[in-house]
Image: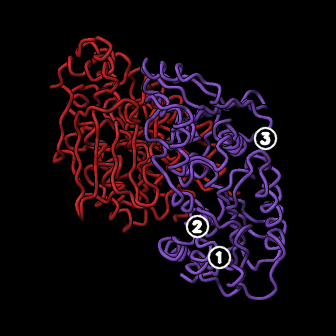
Chain colours: A red, B purple
Amino acid sequence: MGSRRLRLALVGFGHVGRAFARLLPGAFARGLRDAGLAPVVTGIATSRHGSAIDPRGLDLAAAEEIASQGGDLRQLHRGRPPRGTLEFVASVPADVLLEVTPLDPRRGEPATRHVRRALERGLHVVTANKGPVAFSLSSLLVLARRRRRRFLFEGAVMDGVPVFNLVRSCLPGVRVLGFRGVLNTTTTRILAGVESGRRFEDALADARRDGVAEADPSLDVDGWDAAVKTCALANALLDASLRPDRLARRGIAGLRPAAVRAARRSGGAIRLVARARRAGRRVAAQVGPERLAAFDVLASERADGVLVLETDLLGEIGIYQGPSGVEQTAYALFSDLLSLAAPRR
Amino acid sequence: MGSRRLRLALVGFGHVGRAFARLLPGAFARGLRDAGLAPVVTGIATSRHGSAIDPRGLDLAAAEEIASQGGDLRQLHRGRPPRGTLEFVASVPADVLLEVTPLDPRRGEPATRHVRRALERGLHVVTANKGPVAFSLSSLLVLARRRRRRFLFEGAVMDGVPVFNLVRSCLPGVRVLGFRGVLNTTTTRILAGVESGRRFEDALADARRDGVAEADPSLDVDGWDAAVKTCALANALLDASLRPDRLARRGIAGLRPAAVRAARRSGGAIRLVARARRAGRRVAAQVGPERLAAFDVLASERADGVLVLETDLLGEIGIYQGPSGVEQTAYALFSDLLSLAAPRR
């Protein structure tokens, strides 16, 4: 099969971006080549390590080493350097923008700006960033359609586990009526820690030490991360137009440790549960702690996420994600890139 | 979009076949027409209600009424009646055979014969029957490839929940290394009944009354049903060549009720667990009762099935099926038919 060159530009080069760069030359490139695509990374933009563009393709191993040692990517750059990330997005010679910047979940930026700018200039956009999906999905999809480009975001929720692709590719004719899920790993870890006798603060410290918690732990504890995921899912699966900053949201900070332990002793568990449901033309959604019964699938142990879809033709379908890492998110980017090769259904 | 006529012949007209016939004129036909296919059922063969062929299309409502009242489908037949089901399969004017006969899980027949004969004469085959997949998948796939036809079987395990399609369509490049699952609803119901104080026999009677148990309950209790599903999954997802009659298989009949209740009291649960795993070039698999820990996703309540795939790139991905019925299985037939419209990837 003949190969078509696929020029990729990365915005953001943190854990996910670097995992992608590490995996691209091996398994991912093989898969893409089998689908007729020859990937090359022509640009990387970061806020802290500078940016680099090389139309002939960047040396990814060198880029990863520079970034991980705190160096400056500009030493890999050729030509006039772009001023800032938005100019990078507007000018990098690429076919696809991979958006993997850190997210401010209260505003969905700067990711949404990057996505919009890239679509406007006619790039496909693949993101693992839930912000644009949670804050602006419908307008971004309209923009993508107008430009005849794809906006793909499998990695936005549950990392590489195919949530959006499952519904799109494997459930033809099925209408999703609602969902419930436990989508934030940090709060699950904290509550499990409290159940086993840890103090709240110590359980949170454990989650941070394990690299699970957000840099700003209030984003987990106050339910922001779960709210953004809930809106992303509701917007994509229920055609909703929700925004995280308007969602009914309660975190776990106000829970009494004694209540958390009592729930566990009685066989159940308190978890931060996300819910959404069609109600006529509207979609009602919320995030808050709930007491789950023993053996509720949402309380499954060792889960980094559990999502149960309620559907019209198939009843309840649940998806369970085991312990997960950045490689899984990088896989989501790869699977989205692959679908650029396939004819759109 | 122009429509291509898609002639369907049903072998078997029990719960699943009738549910399909009931749903076809509405949602299913709409979905198929959107994909460019105009479905028409040209034949129905049964072992107890006779057979009917009409190249112009059978009246499905009439067929369903006749069958449900114990009548004979021959009154809908036109022309020389076929002698027996195999002659029906060999001669019915059709593009696709839908195989939905009852299964003898100890031998995988008569379904496998039907599938083979239909593929040989150049029909696509769609089945909700796990027997052919468990006993003869690789040879049937070879035959299908040679005839340039599809052999599709999404409904064989977990009804309409897309297990096989998930791996085929949504996990490109991912290698499934193994799986564990609770796949037999009857044994789960019996064990849950025993946990709550019922006698084994009474819990089994409950499951039969609810229409969950096989007509011959030993097929559930002795692990045959789970063994057939395990082989179907292993053959399709792990490229194994297992056969249910050679699988290490233990049922739940030998379990002591006191042990079942003690496991539950300590927060866990005993369930009939299916396991398979690649081991070099071989695949090791087994079915038997296991003690699951509290909050193991396999022990999820209200589940008609739970399957956890172990993969190389994505770690563990679980699929949970809520309470389910024949409509879900009928949906699997529909989703397989839809993929006959799509270009093969």
Q: Which chain does the residue under circle 1 lie in?
A: B
**Amino acid type, callout 1:** Gly
Measured in 3D between alpha carbons, the distance from the residue under mark 1 to the one under mark 2, in whole angstroms, is 32 Å
Up the image or down, B18 lies above or below A305; here it is below
Q: Chain of mark 2?
A: B
Left or right of residue B12: residue A214: left
Looking at the picture, how far across and down is residue A80, in whole percent? Answer: 38, 44
Residue type marked 2: Leu
Front label number (3 vs 2): 3
Q: Chain of mark 3?
A: B
Label 3's element? loop
Mark 3 lies on residue = B243
Q: Secondary structure at mark 2?
A: helix
Mark 1 in CB contact with mark 3 (< 8 angstroms): no
Q: Depth check: give the residue in front, B201 or B266.
A: B201
Counting residues from the N terminus, which is met first, the one under dot 3 or under dot 2? 3
Q: Earlier in the sequence, mark 1 or mark 2?
A: 1
Residue identifier under label 1: B71
Q: Is residue A235 above or below residue A330?
A: below
Q: Dot 2 corresponds to which residue?
A: B338
Q: Is residue A292 left or right of residue B298?
A: left
The answer to which of B309 and B61 lies nearer the viewer is B61
Q: Are marks 1 and 3 on the same chain?
A: yes
Would residue A238 appear left or right of B184 to someone viewing this image?
Answer: left
Q: Is residue B303 above or below residue A195?
A: below
Q: Residue B267: x percent and y percent?
A: 42, 21
In which quadrant will I find the C terminus of chain B?
Answer: bottom right
Give the number of the disc on residue A53.
none
Q: CA distance from mark 1 to mark 3?
A: 37 Å
